[in-house]
């Protein structure tokens, strides 16, 4: 996780980052299915990144790649690795989601087993249903 405020800031056990880690671990295949379904909807040429906005109520959003690159410039290339990972992302093999909190970002990156296309097929539901289900679960997890 990258912090953009004072160097003394450290996430605690109840931080949004730790809660999000638990949510991701518990829902890897569903997140992979969602990421693949959204990738199919947006297309390979999309310049948008799947993200989670943690402000108030956690929700899935899209973030433009150019906005992440601009943020990288503003923070003197402190998130260059994040930009590189997002640019090299292989959606058919891995899930990459950018979580955005107040003054912080976190890159969620994992390779699910099975791969995202298989997860989507096994989910046997549409993207909107997956999105609603995962957002509700994420909201509950973030409250806890």
Image: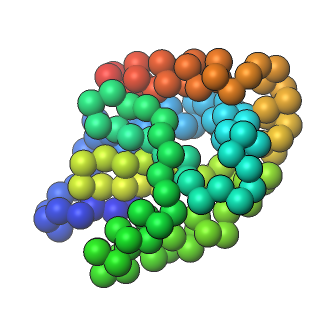
In the rendered image, residue 9, in percent from the top left (x then y), is placed at 18, 58
In the rendered image, residue 142, in percent from the top left (x then y), is placed at 36, 28
Left or right, residue 131 beside residue 121: left
- Residue drawn at x 40%, y 23% is 139
- Residue drawn at x 57%, y 18% is 133
In the rendered image, residue 46, in percent from the top left (x then y), is placed at 65, 56
Comparing 83 with 14, the one in front is 83
- Residue drawn at x 30%, y 81% is 76
Residue 96 is at least partly visible in this image: yes
Q: Which residue lies furthest to the bottom in this view?
A: 76
Comparing 82 with 112, the one in front is 82
- Residue drawn at x 37%, y 49% is 100
In the rendered image, residue 27, in percent from the top left (x then y), is placed at 61, 30
Left or right, residue 55 beside residue 67: left
Comparing 21 with 115, the one in front is 115
Left or right, residue 119 beside residue 49: right
Left or right, residue 140 beside residue 124: left
Identify whether 92 is placed above or below 83.
above
| Colour style of the rendered protein structure | rainbow
State the count of labels.
0
* Quarter of the figure with the N terminus: bottom left
Residue 21 is at least partly visible in this image: no
């Amino acid at each position: 996780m990258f912090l953009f405020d004072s160097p003394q800031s450290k996430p605690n056990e109840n931080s949004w980052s730790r809660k999000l880690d638990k949510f991701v671990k518990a829902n890897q295949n569903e997140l992979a299915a969602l990421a693949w379904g959204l990738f199919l909807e947006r297309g390979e040429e999309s310049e948008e990144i799947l993200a989670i906005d943690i402000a108030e109520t956690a929700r899935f959003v899209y973030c433009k790649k150019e906005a992440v690159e601009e943020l990288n410039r503003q923070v003197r290339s402190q998130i260059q690795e994040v930009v590189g990972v997002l640019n090299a992302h292989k959606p058919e093999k891995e899930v990459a989601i950018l979580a955005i909190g107040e003054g912080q970002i976190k890159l969620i990156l994992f390779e699910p087993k099975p791969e995202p296309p298989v997860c989507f097929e096994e989910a046997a539901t549409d993207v909107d249903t997956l999105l609603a289900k995962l957002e509700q679960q994420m909201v509950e997890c973030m409250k806890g």
